[in-house]
Amino acid sequence: MNAPRRIKRDIDGWIILDKPTGTTSTQAVGAVRWALSARKAGHAGTLDPLATGVLPIALGEATKTVAYVMDGQKRYRFTVTWGQETDTDDSEGKVVRESALRPTREAIMALLPRYTGTIEQVPPQFSAIKIQGERAYDLAREGESVTLVARQVNVYELTLADMPDDDHAVFECECGKGTYVRSLARDIGRDLGCLGHVSTLRRTQVGDFRADEAVSLEAILALREHPEAAAQLRTILHPIAGALADLPHIAIDRHAAERLRRGQAALLRGRDAPIIEGEAYATCHGELIAIGTVEAGMFQPSRVFRSGGIITS
């Protein structure tokens, strides 16, 4: 006989997954969703299969806040292997160019300011960028010539962390949305004349979500058979509002919360009413109610939440 089908649960909040190498972001989300029997799940910011580290997974109502996490700053630690450039700009690709040159520490340090600030960057051929409706990596895998246009990205910090030997250098980077670490490695290698590609990559932070609070995929899969799975899940489930740290916060009363949940604007009353304009999020007694826009003392909701980060069934 077939085992009874598990009932999907409404789980609202964020899981900060420490993605293992060799797993795609989509596979990781699917595994988490299966393990938790979650009705709805998505992720904020794709990691390559080679990469490990912070992959924020949104469950239920948290999927409404994915864009805010994706817009947040990210931190990476990555190793560049010198002497070879690959078609994917990482170690999973085919070597397309080679060089016997190796850079000195002084040469690397002198170059890094060029890659800090707002820079022009061409994404890798094997990337999720769309070209006439098709993903660049799909076209590249089919052998088509892929030409991607340079675009502006923000690199807030890029430091040389280690040089374990002549063939490798370890970097740490803080960057904005749309920055490709693989492109940084490729372009730095070209400028140094030695060529290079990413051989290890770990994301250590996305917005306010950090690696030191991430949970392994094995630990999450183990919850499926844990006798106290619900209690254990609550210890690793982050509230939805954790994605909204860059927005102003407004505390409202129950009357205003009821109006917002009906999709109606609410007047921010009293002498303690915040003096802000623009996008913000509202909570009532610690529970997330809505994201919206404040204008002339009124809060107009744009996204309304049924819960602020709990297991509801």
Image (spheres, rainbow, N blue to C red):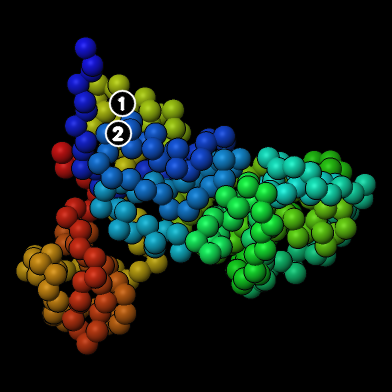
Question: Tag 1, which secondary structure?
Answer: helix
Considering the image in quadrants, where does the C terminus appear?
top left
Say which quarter of the image contains residue 95: top right
Across the whole image, how many numbered discs are drawn on residues? Answer: 2
* Outermost top residue: 1
Across and down, in percent, residue 134 comes to 52, 57
Give amino acid for label 1. Answer: Arg
Across and down, in percent, residue 116 comes to 68, 68
* Left or right of residue 96, residue 226 in this image: left
Q: Which mark is residue 36?
A: 2
Whether residue 175 is situated above or below residue 203 in the rendered picture: below
Question: Tag 2, which secondary structure?
Answer: helix
Identity of the residue drawn at 37% across and 57% down: 66
Identity of the residue drawn at 46% across and 64% down: 71
Callout 2 touching callout 1 (CB < 8 Å): yes
Please indicate, yes or no, whether residue 38 appears anywhere in the rendered image: yes
Query: Which comes sooner in the sequence, label 2 or label 1?
Result: 2
Give amino acid for label 2. Answer: Leu
Q: Which residue is mark 1?
A: 224
Whether residue 258 is situated above or below residue 311 in the rendered picture: below
Say which quarter of the image contains residue 4: top left
